[in-house]
Amino acid sequence: MPRSPSKRIQSIKKEPADSPEQTEPKCRQSVMFMKDSLFSSADIQVIKLKHPRTLNSAMFIYDKKGKQLFELVAFDEEYRSWLIGETVQSDGKLYITTPVDVSYLILPYLMQSTKNVPLDHLLEDDQFPAIVHVSSLAAGKDFSHIADRKGSPNLGVWKYNQESTLSWLEGRVRKLSALLQEKKVPTSNAQSFTYVRAMNLEQTQGE
C-alpha cells in the first residue's frame, strides 16, 4: 500500500536537515604584481577608461599622488589556479600593472575630434567619466609628437597629426624591439614563450 502524502512530505523535509550546508569561500584572493609604492599609497583608484587599441572598456590604476597611470593587465589561461596559504583559488589569473603614457589614451579622442577645442574639453566622455583623471595628467604636457598646437600654449588646443603619430609609434616599436633583443626574449610566432632557452640575436627577431 502506498504511503500517505503526509509521510512523503515529512521524508522530503528531513533530507536537507541531515545534509551539511555548503558555504562559499569567505573571501576571494588574487595574484598581482604592483609597485610597492602603490600598495602603500592611499591615493590610488581603479578606474575604467577607453582602451586606445580596442576602444572598449579597460581597467587602469590612477595614482593621484604620484601623478601616474597604470594599465591593469590580466593574463588568463584555462585550467589554472593559485595555491595561496592553505586555500585554492580557482581564479588563476595573473594581474600585472604597467605604466601608461597618457598620449595613447588621448589619441582616440584626438583622431575623432572635428573641432579645435582645449584638451580638457576634448577629454569628456559620458561613457568613461574617469577620463577627467587623464585630463589632469595631460595638463601642460607637450603633445607635439602626435598633434599640432593651435593658438596660444595657454589654451591647450591640439589637432591630430597622423604623420607625427606614425613616426612616434615607429620609434617606440624600434626601442621595444631593441630591448627585447637585448634581453633575448623570443618574439617569433614560431617560438614558444612557455619554455626558456638560450637564444642568439637572430632567434629573437620576429619573422
Image (spheres, rainbow, N blue to C red):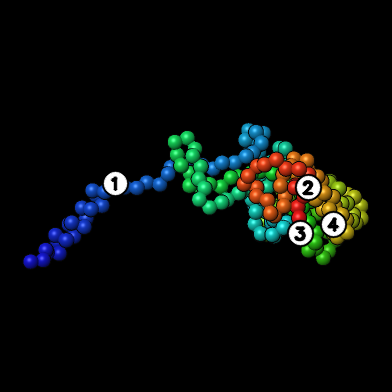
Q: Earlier in the sequence, mark 3 or mark 4?
A: 3
Measured in 3D between alpha carbons, the distance from the residue under mark 1 to the one under mark 2, in whole angstroms, is 62 Å
The residue where tag 1 is placed is: 20
Measured in 3D between alpha carbons, the distance from the residue under mark 1 to the one under mark 4, in whole angstroms, is 63 Å
Residue 85 in the image: state x and y as whole percent.
47, 35
Query: Is residue 85 placed above or below 194 in the rendered structure?
Result: above
State if disc 4 and disc 1 touch (CB < 8 Å).
Answer: no
Q: Which mark is residue 108?
A: 3
- Within 10 Å of disc 3 (Cα), the crowding (few <14, some 14-19, many 20+) is some
Secondary structure under badge 4? helix
Q: Is residue 49 left or right of residue 3?
A: right
Q: Quadrant of the C terminus?
A: bottom right
Question: Mark 2 or 3, which is nearer the eye?
Answer: 2
Disc 1 residue type?
A: Pro
- Which residue is situated farthest in the left direction here? 1
Q: Is residue 172 left or right of residue 16?
A: right
Q: Which mark is residue 95?
A: none
Q: Is residue 194 left or right of residue 99?
A: left
Secondary structure under badge 1? loop
Residue 30 in the image: state x and y as whole percent.
54, 43
Disc 2 residue type?
A: Glu
Secondary structure under badge 3? helix
- Which residue is situated farthest in the right direction here? 151
Question: Mark 4 or 2, which is nearer the eye?
Answer: 2
Q: Earlier in the sequence, mark 1 or mark 2?
A: 1
